[in-house]
Image: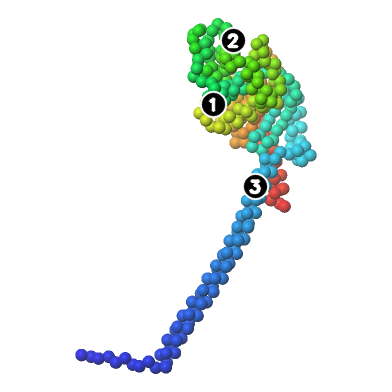
Amino acid sequence: MIKFKLKPFTRKHIYIILGIVFFTFLFLFINDIKININANRLIKENKVANELLKKLKLKEQQYNECLNLPFNDEEKPEELLNKEAEIKNYLNKYKTSIYLFNPQNNYSFKYNEDKIYYAASLRKMPLALYYYLKADEGIINLDEGIKYTSDYLYENSKGTKKHQLNSYIPIRSLLKYSIRYSDNSAYIMLLNHIGINNFISYLNSLGVKYLNISNNDFFGSTNVNDSMIYIKSLDEYFQTNTHNAMELQEHFINSILNYLAYDDIKAASKYGYADSYFHLNGIVYTKNPYYISILTTEGKNETVFKNINKIMNELNENYLLIKEETCKNKVFKK
């Protein structure tokens, strides 16, 4: 059997071991210092990054607030003033009043706003809204029927004419007819059912100024300021996204003589027409949606309305571009 003898440790061996231990600890110590330095650097860099992020978020908030705050007359850039003046000059050739409003940035443009017009079927817009609001409150049952009698045989009543006299037509159907087809019989049945005074009280609660509705005149008068109240109230209801709200919105989108819709752009619209009076109120669903009221005594002229709506859309888009550039300069170039 072979035996191994371990050599005794020499001083040299001890120095080698001590050296290894020393340099190991030295390496670990230096590495720890590097780690701490890097950690401190990362902490500082994170603090700087967080501060920059906070500043950026603040700038974005200020930018969005700037976009939502309309120019006052003194602040309006010359480019916008010139564009508005150009459009007003163009509109002078028409017998019309205009109110454009953008709900996202609160921009508004008015032309001949104080002129009073016969409302005609524009009044069907707030009546339909009133019914749906009362239905949501549980006061009205939209599936309840109203008796269709000979008292309600009015012209321009495409929907109700499909029903037999003395039959009961559901309120929901009458609302559809009054908006999609501008059915006069449906409107008057609904108006009598709810009560003219109740309807007038509702319009007064909205802040509507011109009414003149009576048993002798179911439509009365209006102007673009009153019309804009209807449109804003209607869109506020649409924004609830309830089943009833979406149903009502579809009626307006699919209404006849919807000259506010064009190409692939939808519009929730209602027209009013009597003799030379022809009007359109609605919400135009472009990428930058806007409300618009166009009241005229130009008769039922599709070209006139499409031309006016086109330049209003251009103004709406131009305003956004001008406002974006103004806010960028104001917020980010300080």
Toward the right, the furthest residue is 74
Element marked by disc 3? helix
* Amino acid type of the residue that numbered disc 2 sits on in the rendered structure: Glu
- In the rendered structure, which amino acid carries the disc numbered 1? Asp
Residue 314's place in the image compared with 214, above or below, is: below
Q: Which residue is mark 3?
A: 61
Asked if disc 2 and disc 3 are in contact, CB closer than 8 Å, the reply is: no
Q: Dot 2 corresponds to which residue?
A: 155
Please identify the quadrant where the N terminus is shown: bottom left
The Cα atoms of the two marked residues, 1 and 2, are separated by 31 Å
Residue 269's spot in the image, x, y percent? 60, 24
> Of the residues under marks 3 and 1, which one precedes in the sequence?
3
Q: Position of residue 260 (x, y in %)?
A: 62, 26
Quick one: label 1 or label 2, which is nearer the N terminus? 1
* Count of marks overlaid on the render: 3
Crowding near the residue tagged with mark 2, few <14, some 14–19, many ≥20 C-alpha atoms within 10 Å: few
- Does residue 75 show up? yes
The numbered dot on residue 136 is 1
Of marks 3 and 1, the one in the foreground: 1
Residue drawn at the location 55% of the way across and 26% of the way down: 137
The answer to which of marks 2 and 3 sits earlier in the sequence is 3
Q: CA distance from mark 2 to mark 3?
A: 54 Å
In which quarter of the view is residue 223 placed? top right
The amino acid pointed to by label 3 is Gln
Contact? badges 3 and 1 (CB < 8 Å): no
